[in-house]
Image (cartoon, rainbow, N blue to C red):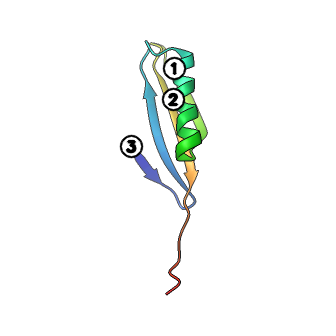
Amino acid sequence: MFRKNSQYEYRVVTFEPDTTVPDARKALTDEAEYGRWELARTLLYIGGRRKVWLRRKIIKVSSTL
């Protein structure tokens, strides 16, 4: 799921309760390293489900032609 703001683009990632912390950390590290996402917000639900919001700056390219 993507949501756009004026400066940032957001992506929401959900982890099921059976996902281990090291596995979630590895997935978020890969997103940060290869997709240039940064951690914006995390939420831990009572059942153990985790919801993580990632964001990255929107780079606007202007035409040089």
- Mark 1 lies on residue: 23
**Relative to the observer, which residue lies in front, 60 or 26?**
26
| Picture quarter with the N terminus | top left
**Relative to the observer, which residue lies in front, 19 or 8?**
19
Kind of residue indicated by mark 2:
Ala
Which type of secondary structure does the marked residue at label 3 adopt? loop
Disc 2 crowd, CA 10 A, few/some/many (<14, 14-19, 20+): some
Q: Position of residue 49 (x, y in %)?
A: 45, 19
| Residues at marks 2 and 1 touching, judged by CB atoms closer than 8 Å | yes
Q: Position of residue 32 (x, y in %)?
A: 58, 40
The answer to whether residue 36 is above or below residue 15 is below
- Mark 3 lies on residue: 1
Gap in Å between the C-alphas at discs 2 and 3? 16 Å
Q: Position of residue 46 (x, y in %)?
A: 48, 14
Kind of residue indicated by mark 3:
Met
Gap in Å between the C-alphas at discs 3 and 1? 21 Å
Residue drawn where x is 54% and y is 62% of the image? 6
Number of marks in picture? 3
User: Residue lying farthest bottom?
Assistant: 65
Which type of secondary structure does the marked residue at label 2 adopt? helix
Q: Which is nearer the N-term, disc 2 or disc 3?
A: 3
Residue drawn where x is 58% and y is 59% of the image? 7
Which type of secondary structure does the marked residue at label 1 adopt? helix
- Mark 2 lies on residue: 27
Residue drawn where x is 53% and y is 77% of the image? 62
The answer to whether residue 37 is above or below residue 5 is above
Q: Which is nearer the N-term, disc 3 or disc 1?
A: 3
Dot in front, 2 or 3: 2
| Residues at marks 2 and 3 touching, judged by CB atoms closer than 8 Å | no
Gap in Å between the C-alphas at discs 2 and 1? 6 Å
Kind of residue indicated by mark 1:
Asp
